[in-house]
Amino acid sequence: MVKVNENYGKLPGSYLFSEVARRIAAYTAAHPEANIIKLSIGDVTRPLAPAVIEAMHQAVEEMGTFEGFHGYGPEQGYPFLREAIAQFDYRERGVDIKPEEIFVSDGAKSDCGNIGDIFGVDNKVAVCDPVYPVYVDTNAMAGRAGEYQEETGRWSNLIYMPCVEENGFAPVPPKERADIIYLCFPNNPTGSMATREQLQQWVDYANANGSVILYDSAYEAFITGPDIPHSIFEIEGARTCAIEFRSFSKTAGFTGNRCAYTVVPMELERSGVKLNAMWNRRQTTKFNGVPYVVQRGAAAIYTPQGRQQIMESISYYQRNAQVIREGLTQAGLECFGGVNAPYIWLKTPDRMGSWDFFDLVLDRANVAITPGVGFGPSGEGYVRLTAFGDAQATCQAVERIRKML
Amino acid sequence: MVKVNENYGKLPGSYLFSEVARRIAAYTAAHPEANIIKLSIGDVTRPLAPAVIEAMHQAVEEMGTFEGFHGYGPEQGYPFLREAIAQFDYRERGVDIKPEEIFVSDGAKSDCGNIGDIFGVDNKVAVCDPVYPVYVDTNAMAGRAGEYQEETGRWSNLIYMPCVEENGFAPVPPKERADIIYLCFPNNPTGSMATREQLQQWVDYANANGSVILYDSAYEAFITGPDIPHSIFEIEGARTCAIEFRSFSKTAGFTGNRCAYTVVPMELERSGVKLNAMWNRRQTTKFNGVPYVVQRGAAAIYTPQGRQQIMESISYYQRNAQVIREGLTQAGLECFGGVNAPYIWLKTPDRMGSWDFFDLVLDRANVAITPGVGFGPSGEGYVRLTAFGDAQATCQAVERIRKML
């Protein structure tokens, strides 16, 4: 008899965004006239940049000819894309990353989940609280999380690092030994950023303890502050302790185009094994590369036109973030994030519970947001708003929330 | 200190196709004038069908507009594609598969590897010998294969089912209890096919033992015989014991376009858990769907024009298979496969070793083939030739091999 992976049975039932969608659907059914503005899911809304569209058309054209057809490509990505990433996302910022340290993939969500394949089950994992649920769920599936405790909303074997107002939503290294540490900056969901000094503390901790930092910088393009690190590899010593995840999803609106990459430095070794070689083996065995057409589209964002065009979209979303942040702050609410990040982390008024405030805003302002507690117990009393919507709708949503208060 | 997944260290070093590539490169370096024809790797060579190209252009165009832009899609694939698959690949052939049983993905290689996530480590896995290396390597990585034994070329904890001339290269259920059984028909590498009766034996075995059959039918489009099952779900009882992998790679030349799908029937349960729900959870947590543009391209093969166009390419490759099979048979060599499959499984003359024959054919005919032993010990004394090349080059390769004998 086949034995199923019993860890799946431990996962709590409903996924945050399914529950959000369910409540919106129920509300809409009861109030068909309501015009709901969604500032909930972090999906982009602006079309792909003209340079990307042009490159994709050209690649589609090639795929229809004998001479231009591309079959299986390198699992790690085409050299033209790996080299552009190394050049423009790293070397131009003074960080030396080689193309062979870059693994192009179909998404940071896939990579954040699949990276667990190269680690043993018997590792102690540390996550932020609140946190992007994929880090937690994939470790639970792999058997690293222990048991889910309904009463606390936490897993018995994970180390939770509360990210709260008191620490500026940036965790400090735990006293307990952590082997694998997930960090995400600019942070989802709190929109917080870590300083160079804070990241240095983490890198020093990881090197001292033989830990590995899994650094998710999917929102890197939203950083505006001149002193804020864009990459963990700007920090001295990171090449011996960190793996970085990046994505074209938020940088270039690729959520429906699926392209991301993971950087595993050559110096990163544990038990005498290069993690770059392990990830390479994982990817060549269980993955077969990203569509040629998509990789051509991704490479186009590094052309002068492409860069300018994606910066326009990012600025557009940044203005939305500003509108939300300033509008709600002026209305007397306490807002965090939204400066170097597309997320605004809003404290509910009067210590209201996240879901209660969600229901209230849905009902009174017809605006959908995301309850903070869905990202972990320390998110209780907060909600997340995203800046990825239409500018006019975003202004309107802020106006409606102001009016309801 | 992080503990790496120690199973990776057990994997034998060089991957079959890397070694083939290395030998070709070494030969080419020593003989720069040689015009090598490759009948080795199973990659397609003909361009995407015009209907696919048109659909992809249109989808790219949409992605460049506000109205037509698609962000995150359903992780399981868009309804338009899942419905077309259910209709044309199944219902039209009299097999009732529902759209919600179909999970669109970026490749059968990914799915064949990732499916292991939903099973426990403590399962006994049975594979054919010779076999597509991904089944073995992914189970070795997950800790199900035991130890690799250099002297036999086998893993200590896998059940190997020899596929040899005596059993028509189709295995029978093993005496030992197998929990997870990988079957691939039309077979890679032997090009063999299983009859309805043979598959019924497997389904009965799996239902009686609570096993799960992982049925890879990536080469289904090459079946011509009217009585040969295209899907495991044509077999009575398969809905309670089988998962099927399909791919657009060989059906529609999508090797560089990355689209495939996996079918998990609703009735398939083990330990009271629906595997469809488990796979859905796995995919929604660790995967984020296939690019919209690619899914539109895939859906186009189900239009009348699309179907006709992809059939033309398949016929082209089928003629290559016939040319190889007949040409080498006439030359006195013993050939298997190549009728309902794009692979020809050639017995080496005079019981020559696979790699010796590979070197000989490379040197004397300047043709690259794949040594059978690379797929497992029972492949020794065989080589695999693929029908995915250019027709003229394929004829020339056959001619050259005939002359060298």
Image (cartoon, coloured by chain):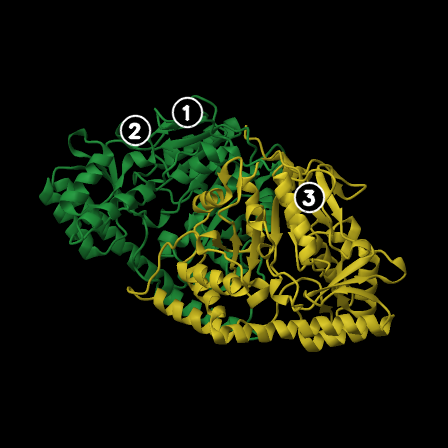
Chain colours: A yellow, B green
Three-letter amino acid code at the position of disc 1: Pro
Residue pointed to by mark 1: B174
Residue B165 lies, in percent from the top left, at 26, 30
User: Does label 2 or label 1 sit earlier along the sequence?
Assistant: 2
Do the residues at discs 3 and 1 belong to one chain? no
Three-letter amino acid code at the position of disc 2: Asn
Q: Nearer the viewer, residue A53 or B189?
A: A53
* Rendered residue at 17%/49% (across/down): B31
Q: CA distance from mark 3 to mark 1?
A: 44 Å
Q: Would residue B238 be found to the left or right of residue B380 on screen? A: right
Q: Nearer the viewer, residue B351 or A323?
A: A323
Measured along the vertical axis of the image, is residue B326 above or below residue B380?
below
Q: Secondary structure at mark 3?
A: strand
Question: In the rendered structure, the residue with mark 2 lies on which chain?
Answer: B
Three-letter amino acid code at the position of disc 3: Ala
Question: In the rendered structure, the residue with mark 1 lies on which chain?
Answer: B
Residue B145 lies, in percent from the top left, at 47, 29
* Rendered residue at 50%/62% (across/down): A91
Q: Residue furthest front?
A: A236
* Disc 3 residue crowd, few under 14, some 14–19, many 20+, Cα 10 Å: many
Do the residues at discs 2 and 1 belong to one chain? yes
Q: Residue furthest bottom?
A: A392
Question: In the rendered structure, the residue with mark 3 lies on which chain?
Answer: A
Mark count: 3
Residue pointed to by mark 2: B167
Q: Secondary structure at mark 1?
A: loop
Numbered badge on residue A126: 3
Front disc: 3 or 1: 3
